[in-house]
Every structure is written in structure tokens, then in C-alpha cells.
Amino acid sequence: MTTASLLMLTGRIVFGLFFLIAALRNTIHFRERIPSATNYGWAMPPVLVAGGLAMQWIGGLSLVLSFYPVLGALVLIAFLVLATACYHNPLAFEGKARDPHLYLVLVNITLAAGLLLVIADSL
């Protein structure tokens, strides 16, 4: 195994663990997540919240286990896009209330970019 492939494998596993830890925490606190109010004033239906959890589990496991990592990365990118749109729309806030949402949008964009690197390495 080359140094580059070892680094990519390590990075992919750490990336997957990030989402698995989030999935575990969200699963443990699932009842606290319901009702899950979006930035738009409506509650996310529990079945959709559970779908988001499933996406975190599936994508995270896919990356950690190197089992269809491209598909797992695509699932996680879809999750990030949907979660960002529903929960972190900085345009729905003003002043200081906007700051954490803008930060989380940037974090999610960065995570999606990292997942694109995972996809590129797997092709």
C-alpha cells in the first residue's frame, strides 16, 4: 500500500466516523429531535428526520467499511444539502442570529467538498 492510498483510506475512515458519531448521537436523542422545527417555521415530519438519520448511518458505514464509498459519499452529500436547506438557511436570519447558520453552511459545503474528494479517489 502506498503512502497516498494509506492516507486516503485513513481520511475516508475518519470522515465516515464523523457521520457515524453524528448518527449515533442523533439516534440516541431522536425523541428530543421531534418535533424538529426547520428555519421556515414548520416541523419536519418524524419519518423525514428518521430518513436523515438513515442517510448518516448508511453513508458513514459505507465510508468506514469501504463498501460502495462513491454511493455512500453521494448519500452524505444529499443529506448535507437537505439538512443545510432545512436547518441552516442564513437568509432566514438577521444580525448575530445569522452567524452560526452561515458558519454551518460553510462547514457543510466543506464537508461536501471533502466527499467529492472521496468520490474522485474511488473512481
Image (tube, grey):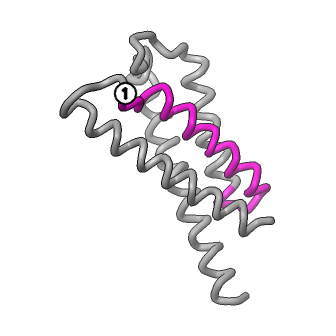
**Image height check: is 1 above or below 113?**
below
Q: Is residue 93 left or right of residue 67?
A: left
Residue at image x 64%, y 38%? 78
Q: To which residue does mark 1 refer? A: 91
Which is more toward the observer, 21 or 41? 41
Residue at image x 68%, y 81%? 5
Q: Please state the horizontal and vertical placement of residue 32, each as a whole percent of the image.
A: 38, 23
| Residue stretch rendered in magenta on the structure | 63-90
Which is more toward the observer, 17 or 110? 110
Q: Is residue 17 left or right of residue 61?
A: left
Q: Please state the horizontal and vertical placement of residue 2, each as a whole percent of the image.
A: 70, 89
Which is more toward the observer, 46 or 96? 96
**Image height check: is 73 above or below 43?**
below
Q: Please state the horizontal and vertical placement of residue 11, each as a whole percent of the image.
A: 57, 69
Residue at image x 70%, y 50%? 72
Q: Please state the horizontal and vertical placement of residue 53, each as a whole percent of the image.
A: 57, 34
Residue 89 lies in magenta, yes or no?
A: yes
Image quarter hosting the C terminus: bottom right
